[in-house]
Amino acid sequence: MIWRLLNVEQAFIDAWTDAGRIRQHVVDRQVQAHGQYAPAQRNQNEPRWYYLHYLEPRIRLATVGLPLDQWQGGAKIIIGTCSIIGEFDGNSHLVGERGLKLQMEPLDMLRVQPDDEFVNGMAVLLELSNQIMDRDALRQYEQREARRLDAQRRRQRWQEGRR
């Protein structure tokens, strides 16, 4: 998916933590084990910065050209899914889980009609939450509730057996 973000505001910037440098040995090991190569980067010479969402480290953001705290104006955002390989310290405990990867580029790199447009970054995060994070939270809640009800039924059967 490609989204147009009209304004990168401070609240959006504050929602991310610096992921630090990529642990290249983890990436190299993944490539060796699975033969997967990263697609050729269109802008290999453009610097990149990496961030993890402060509440949900399964969501990764890469900015192209500028660090997030220096971003002004709008952005093109490319969104895709990924399998987490633990390439950052902040997501190493999530290896094997599905995640989201976002790439933020300057608006002048937008060459196609975007799938959606958002007034600000918080609207982007809300949409991601509605599409992804809330489903996971609901699934986790349902699993916890099923375990609780199962334990309650076992206790009830055990107590009935004692009578």
Image: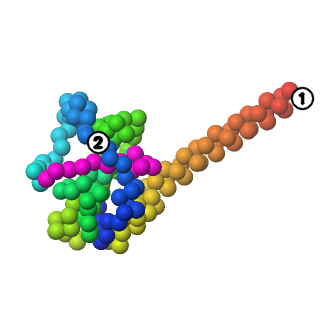
Query: Where, by quadrant of the figure, is residue 149 drawn?
Result: top right
Residue 57 lies left or right of residue 72; in this view the side is right
Foreground mark, 2 or 1, reads: 2
Residue range in magenta is 46-57
Residue 44 pos. (x, y %)? 11, 50
Residue that badge 1 annotates: 163
Toward the top, the furthest residue is: 162
Q: How many marks?
A: 2
Crowding at mark 2 (Cα within 10 Å: few <14, some 14-19, many 20+): some
Query: Where residue 18 appears, x then y in whole percent?
Result: 32, 47
Q: Residue furthest front?
A: 70
Q: Is residue 47 left or right of residue 96?
A: left
Please give left or right for residue 131 compared with residue 87 in the image: right
> From the viewer's perspective, is residue 17 above or below residue 119?
above
Q: Nearer the viewer, residue 113 or 62?
A: 62
* Residue at position x 32%, y 44% in the image: 19
Measured along the vertical axis of the image, is residue 23 above or below residue 77?
above
Q: Is residue 54 magenta?
A: yes
